[in-house]
Image (cartoon, grey):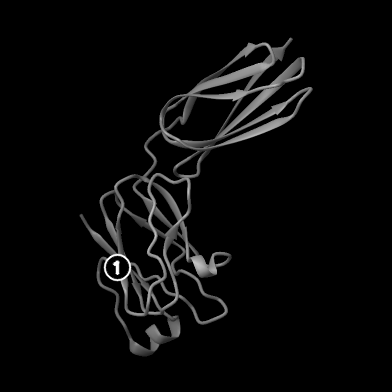
Amino acid sequence: MRRKSLLLAPLTALAALGVAAPSLAADVGVSVEPTFKFTPKTQTVDVGDTVTWTFNDGGHTTTSLPGQPDRWNSHLEKKGAAFEHTFTKPGRYQYICIPHRDFMKGTIVVGRDTVKKTVGAIAAKVRGTKATISFKLKEGAVATLKLKGPKKKTVKTKRLAAGKRTIVVKKLKAGSYTATLTLSDDFDNKTIKKKSFKVG
């Protein structure tokens, strides 16, 4: 297991001190107000690597966004604190500093996407005014289903694990529909599938 150190510090302070990064470290700095940011914005590590955020500036967090294979939250850290997280699941993890969530964002890419096709064929089964869209995921993904027809509808799921999955849409009007299923996998790759069906 390797360790990656991510440093959170004012960039000007690092330059003035002449701080050298350890050989396995990836320096992540926070520039002086008002442009706080994680630098570099994206870092790549292997599955099993431990990332250490070192807070050389206080009042920040490293907090993963929801809907990802793994989650972490350092909570508000003081200057000099360190936070570690070991990544055991591959994926593209987006994270923020909670107090500066609108502009202080970073990404950790863990491993690589080894699944070429997120999903196989999709099917639609209609019973009365209810349609069940079924599909088999080959990897975890977030699904968005958009229906076009006599009644438009959009359904978005939380992250779904691999396996057989269904999305049920009720109270549809009679007529022809096109279902567009958009899947975003853990690496943010998108797959789109379409299926037509009739109600009534």
State the image coordinates of residue 16 (x, y, percent, origin top left).
Answer: 38, 90
Q: Amino acid at mark 1?
A: Ala
Secondary element at image label 1: loop
> Looking at the image, is 157 positioned above or below residue 101?
above
Q: Tell me what residue is drawn at x 44 percent, y 46 percent.
A: 68
Q: Mark 1 sits on what residue?
A: 25
Depth check: give the residue in front, 120 or 167: 167
In the picture provided, is 4 more to the left or to the right than 179?
left
Which residue, as the protein is rendered here, is positioned at the far left? 1
Which residue, as the protein is rendered here, is positioned at the far bottom? 16
Depth check: give the residue in front, 172 or 39: 172
Screen quadrant of the N terminus: bottom left
Q: Tell me what residue is drawn at x 27 percent, y 58 percent.
A: 50
Q: Tell me what residue is drawn at x 46 percent, y 31 percent.
A: 118
> Looking at the image, is 141 positioned above or below residue 169?
below
In the picture provided, is 134 more to the left or to the right than 89?
right
Mark 1 crowd level (few <14, some 14–19, many ≥20, 10 Å Cα): some
Depth check: give the residue in front, 31 or 147: 147
State the image coordinates of residue 182 (x, y, percent, origin top left).
Answer: 58, 33
Q: Tell me what residue is drawn at x 48 percent, y 49 percent.
A: 66
Q: How many marks?
A: 1
Screen quadrant of the C terminus: top right
In the picture provided, is 135 more to the left or to the right than 25?
right
> Looking at the image, is 174 positioned above or below residue 149?
above
State the image coordinates of residue 157 (x, y, percent, origin top left).
Answer: 55, 36
- Quadrant in which residue 5 is drawn: bottom left
